[in-house]
Amino acid sequence: MIPDSILDRARALHESSLVTDLHADTFLAVRYKGSDIARRHARPIGWAPFMLHCDLPRWREGGVRAQGLGIVATKLMTRSPREHARATIALMHETFRKNAGEVELVRDPDELEAAAGRGKLAAFLGLEGAHMYEGDLETVRELHEKGVRYVTLAHFFSNDVVSSSSEKHASVKLTGFGRDVVRELNRLGALVDLAHVHEESFHAALDASESPAIVSHGGCRALRDHHRNLSDSQLHALAARGGVVGVIFFPWYLSRNPLVSLERIVDHMEHIARTVGARHVALGSDWDGFVWMPRGLPDAAALPRLTVELVRRGFSDDEIHGILGGNFLRAWRSAIAVSDAGKVSSRQGASRNTSSEESHRRGAESAEASPRT
C-alpha cells in the first residue's frame, strides 16, 4: 500500500511538470491502419501491433503535455524512403489540422511551452533514420522546414551516415556525408539522436557534433546487455556534452524477463542518475512502436504511476521535474543556442573553432550535476 503522502506528492509533481515523452511511433497505425488519434482506443494486451498505446484522450488523461512522434521508413516498407517520409509528414500535418483544438505542431521549446499552456498536446517530429535523406543535404533542410526537430541517425539498418547497433561490427563509424548531416543539424538547431546507433558510430557522431545529442529511446547495458542499450562509457560521453537519455518502456530492452513491471523502467533511470546524474534522464516510451508495455504501465493514460515510483525511490522534486520534461527541454534549448551563436563548423569539413569547442566544454562541465549516491 503506497502512503497517501507519496501519492499526493506524485500527483502534484506530475500536474506541475511539462511532461514530455521523446518518442512514439503512433503514426505507423495512423498511416497503415487508418487509426484516428482523436478517438480513445482499447488498451493493447501483450504484443498487439497497431493497437495504440496512446491517443489524444489518453495523452490528456496521463498528463502528457508534449510528444515526440517518429517518422519511420525502413527498407522493408519502401524503396523510396524520402518520398515515404514526405508522405508521412504530410499526413501528420493533416492530422494536426483536423485536431487543431487539441494538438499543435511545435518547432522549438518556446512553441512547446506555449501550446501546452493553451491546453494542447505539443507534437514535435523525429526522423527515425538519416537514410531518408538519400544522400542529399538539401533534404535535411527541407524536412527541417517541414517540422523535423530530431534525427535518429540510423534505425534497424546501417546507412550512408552511420552503422546501426544491429550490426555486431560497425561497417562504418561516421561517413563524410554523415559528418555533413551532423553539422547541418547543428546549424539548424535540430537534435542529433543516437538511439539505434552502433557504439563506434555513437562516439564518432558525438565527437562531430557541436551541440548536445540525445538518445530518444534506449536503456542501460549494465542492467540489460542488449545492443540497443548504452554502455556506461556512452552515458559518460553523452552527459559530458549535455545530452539526455529517454528511457524506453519496452520490457525486452529493460530485462530478459518479458513480464517486468514499471519499476524496471525506474531501475534504468536510477542507473543513469547514479552514473552521470539525474539531469540526463528523460522519458522515451517507444509507445506504438511494435512493442509491449511493462506491467502497471499499459498505456499513456497510466503514466502518472511512473511518477509515483520516482517519488517512492527518493528522487527530489527538481530531479522529477527534470526527468518528466525539463532535462530534454534544456538539451533542446542548448542545441538552438549553439545554432544561434553561429558556433557550428562549416559543412566543407573545416576543423572546429578551438575557442568555441573550449567554451562548449566548459559549459557542459559547469552544467554537470553530481551523480546520485
Image: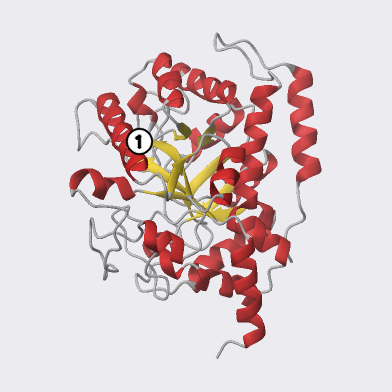
Position of residue 192 relative to residue 183, above or below, is below
Identify residue for label 1.
93
Q: Amino acid at mark 1?
A: His
Viewport quadrant of the C terminus = bottom right
Q: Quadrant of residue 40?
A: bottom left
Residues packed near mark 1 inside 10 Å, few (<14), some (14 to 19) or many (20 plus): some
Residue for point 39% across, 19% down: 139
Residue 312 occupies quadrant: bottom right
Q: Which x, y percent locates residue 225? A: 45, 58
Residue farthest front in this picture? 101
The quadrant the N terminus occupies is bottom right
Q: Nearer the viewer, residue 261 or 7?
A: 7
User: Along the line of sight, which residue is nearer the eye, 274 or 116?
Assistant: 116
Which residue does the image show at 19% across and 45% down from the upper left? 32
- The answer to whether 295 appears left or right of 305 in the picture is left
Q: Secondary structure at mark 1?
A: helix
Horizontal and vertical percent for residue 128? 38, 37
Q: How is the image coloured?
A: secondary structure
307 relative to 114, above or below: below
Q: Position of residue 70 (x, y in %)?
A: 38, 42
Question: Is residue 321 in view from this perspective?
Answer: yes
Q: Is residue 167 visible?
A: no
